[in-house]
Amino acid sequence: MNKIIINKTVKLTILFILTNSILLLFQSCQSNKSKSEKYKDLDDQLLYENFIEVEQTGVNYKIPSPMEMFIFLKKADAPFLNNKTHKTQKCINYISKKEKAINFGIYSADLAYCSVFGDFQQTLIYFKTIKQLADNLGLHEGFGKQMATRIDKNLTNIDSLMEISADSYYKANRFMEEQGQTDIMGLMLVGGWIEGLYLAIESVNDINNSPITERIADQQVLLENLLGYLQKNQNSDDITKVIQDLEQLQEVFDELYFNDENTIITKNQFVNITNGVKSLRNIYIN
C-alpha cells in the first residue's frame, strides 16, 4: 500500500492538491534557468515550500502545495479572473467516471483560486459543486453537510476556511487510497493541473516581462513527472487516454530544451503551450 506523509504546513492546504504544481519529484532534474531578479525573493518564498510526500514502491513523490501558484499570482499583482473559472452549472453534464473525476480536479483548482483571491461566496459554491461530484464518484468521506455548514460559517476567515477544507479533502484522499482508486486520483490530478496552468496562462499580460511566464515554463518538469506518476498507475483505459493527451502537450513543452541558456521561453513557444492547454481543457470541460 502506498504511504502518505502529510507535512504540518501542507495540511492547511491539502484540499487543493489537485491544482497546479502537481507531482514534482525533487529527486529529478529541476530547471536551471535563471529567474528575473525583480521577483527572486518572491519566488524563493513560494516555490515548493510545502508538499505531500507519497512513498510508492520505493520512490518518494513530493507534491508541492497547489496553493502556491495562486499565491504567486496574487503576490505578482495578477488580476483575479473570476470569469475564467469553470462554470459550476456544467457539473450536471458529466456522466462518465472520467468526466466526473477530471472536473472534480478542475473545480478544486477553481475553489483554491477563489479562496486565495478572497471570493468567499464563490468558494462555497465550488465546495458544493465538488461535494456533488464526490457523491457521484462514491467518495463518501469529507464532503458531508456538516463540513459544508462549517465552511458557510467561516466564509470571511480564510485561515479557518482552508483548515476546514483541508480536513475535508484529507478524509476523501484517505478513502480513495484505502479503496485502491488510483485511477480516480490520477484523473483528478490531471484536471487540477490543467486548470491551474490555464489560469496562470490567462493571467499573463506581457509574455516578455512577467514572472508568471517563467513559472509556466517550469511546468515542463512537472508535466514530465505527472506523466511518470500516471504511467506507474496505468490501470484503466481512461488513464491511458489521458496519458496520450498529455504526451502531445509534452511534445510542445519539450521545445524549451532547445532554448539557449538566456532564453526561458519564446513567444512562439508560449503561444503553442497556450493553445495546447486550452485545447485539452476544452475537451475535458465540454
Image (cartoon, helix red, strand yellow):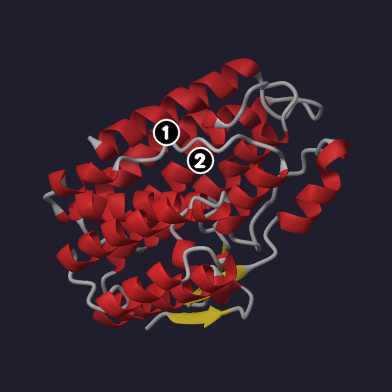
Label 2 element class:
helix
The location of residue 152, given as percent across then percent down, is 39, 68
Q: Quadrant of residue 10?
A: bottom right
Disc 2 marks which amino acid? Answer: Leu
Question: On residue 83, which mark appears?
Answer: 1
**Position of residue 185 in the picture relative to residue 34 (left or right):** left
Label 1 element class:
loop
**Position of residue 130 in the picture relative to residue 254 (left or right):** left
Residue at figure coordinates x 40%, y 51% from the top left: 122
Nearest to the eye among marks 2 and 1: give it. 1
Residue at figure coordinates x 18%, y 71% from the top left: 138
**Position of residue 180 in the picture relative to residue 114 (left or right):** left
Tell me if residue 26 can be seen.
Answer: yes
Disc 1 marks which amino acid? Answer: Asn
Q: Quadrant of residue 215?
A: top right
Quadrant location of the C terminus in the rendered image: top left
**Position of residue 49 in the picture relative to residue 109 (left or right):** right
Quadrant location of the N terminus in the rendered image: bottom left
Pick whichever, 214 or 269, lies toward us.
Answer: 214
Q: Which residue is mark 2?
A: 197
The location of residue 168, given as percent across then percent down, is 39, 75
Pick whichever, 122 or 252, lies toward us.
Answer: 122
Question: On residue 36, which mark appears?
Answer: none
Pick whichever, 234 or 274, lies toward us.
Answer: 274
